[in-house]
Image (spheres, rainbow, N blue to C red):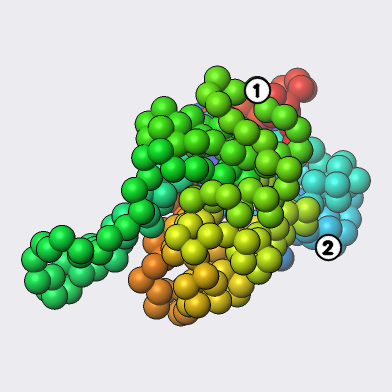
Amino acid sequence: MTGTGTSARTGRVLITRPMTAAVEARARAEFDVEIRSQTTPMTPDEMIASLRDFDVVVPTLGDAYGAEIFAAASAPRCRLLANFGVGFNHIDAEAARRAGVEVANTPGAVTDATADIALTLMLMTARRAGEGERLVRSGQWAGWHPTQMLGLHLSGKRLGVVGLGRIGDAIARRAHYGFGMQIAYVARSDKATDYPAERAESLMALASTVDMLVIAVPGGAETRHLVDAQVLKAMRPHAHLVNIARGEVVEEAALIAALQSGQIAGAGLDVYEFEPEVPQALRDLDSVTLLPHLGTATEEVRSDMGHMALDNVAALLAGQRVPNPV
């Protein structure tokens, strides 16, 4: 732990990873806080202890608060897991509620930054930018010629968005207004948009008609392997897949097989099924752009996320309604 601070607000708070300077300064000024110094996920023993020893915990991706953690902690002292991040599939929210622990997250703060990374990956995979950069760095680039590294021109193409929530909508808006792309999507219900968008009857139907398929659904049991071998087989040979959601939404082994066989043209990934492990087979493929989970990695966004998490902490400790419950 990095140290503690005190405040008029009662209750001990644990932040499970180092945060930006602005967020840590506020936390120390307002709360009796401990900030864990490690950047790695907590161990099961650490998570059990956190539920027993703190009134509020601010966990994040990788801190796997499963049902067994709540069971081992027994009657926990903790009253709130104020998750740092919009995705909370690493927390068993139902088990938390049964144990008397509320769960909150940070929606909204991550939307634009994550959508920007989706567009980054769309461009990089379509235009083979990662492959081109590696070629230049290797010293093997022999110079320009008319048929060198031909990729996919995005302008006017058809984009399929799997999940048209906040982030999916932000991706679609950028693609439509920035590149004139035609938008199709799958979601649980029809979505009202200020750009033309067609709801596909199924994921298979969507996959079979688009040039670029972007995954923007929450993680969890309902969406695990949503994009499997059958969906990948339905995609057109020139199409690309982009995932900025959760790694386990895409069946990684099936994706590798589809890329190795040329079944699809390429992929852009910011997340991985067994993160941070990235299979050597993926790393060996020139047709894949690989990023280290950069979705929200800007100073402004990570600070906004931290402040939103601390707003949830402050409300709970003040006896008020948590503003962002899940």
Instruction: Check the picture and name the quadrant holding the C terminus.
Output: top right
From this viewpoint, is residue 143 visible?
yes
The x, y position of residue 240, in whole percent, is 47, 57
Residue in front for this viewpoint, 121 or 208 = 208
Dot 1 alpha-carbon crowd within 10 angstroms: few under 14, some 14 to 19, many 20 or more: few
Residue drawn at x 36%, y 71% as measured from the top left: 286
Mark 1, residue position? 192
Q: Amino acid at mark 2?
A: Glu
Secondary structure state at the residue bearing disc 1: loop
Q: Is residue 302 above or below residue 225?
A: above
- Marks 1 and 2 close (CB-CB < 8 Å): no
Snapshot quadrant of residue 141: bottom left
- Report which quarter residue 178 is drawn in: top left
Rendered residue at 58%/43% (across/down): 161
At x 65%, y 69%, the residue is: 229
Residue 117 shows up from this direction: no
The x and y percentages for residue 228 are 67, 65
Q: Is residue 75 left or right of residue 215?
A: right
Q: Three-letter amino acid code at disc 1?
A: Ala
**Could you tell which of marks 1 and 2 lies nearer the N-terminus?**
2
What x and y, as percent, mark residue 227? 65, 59
Query: Nearer the viewer's eye, disc 1 or disc 2?
Result: 1
C-alpha distance separating marks 1 and 2: 40 Å
Mark 2 lies on residue: 68
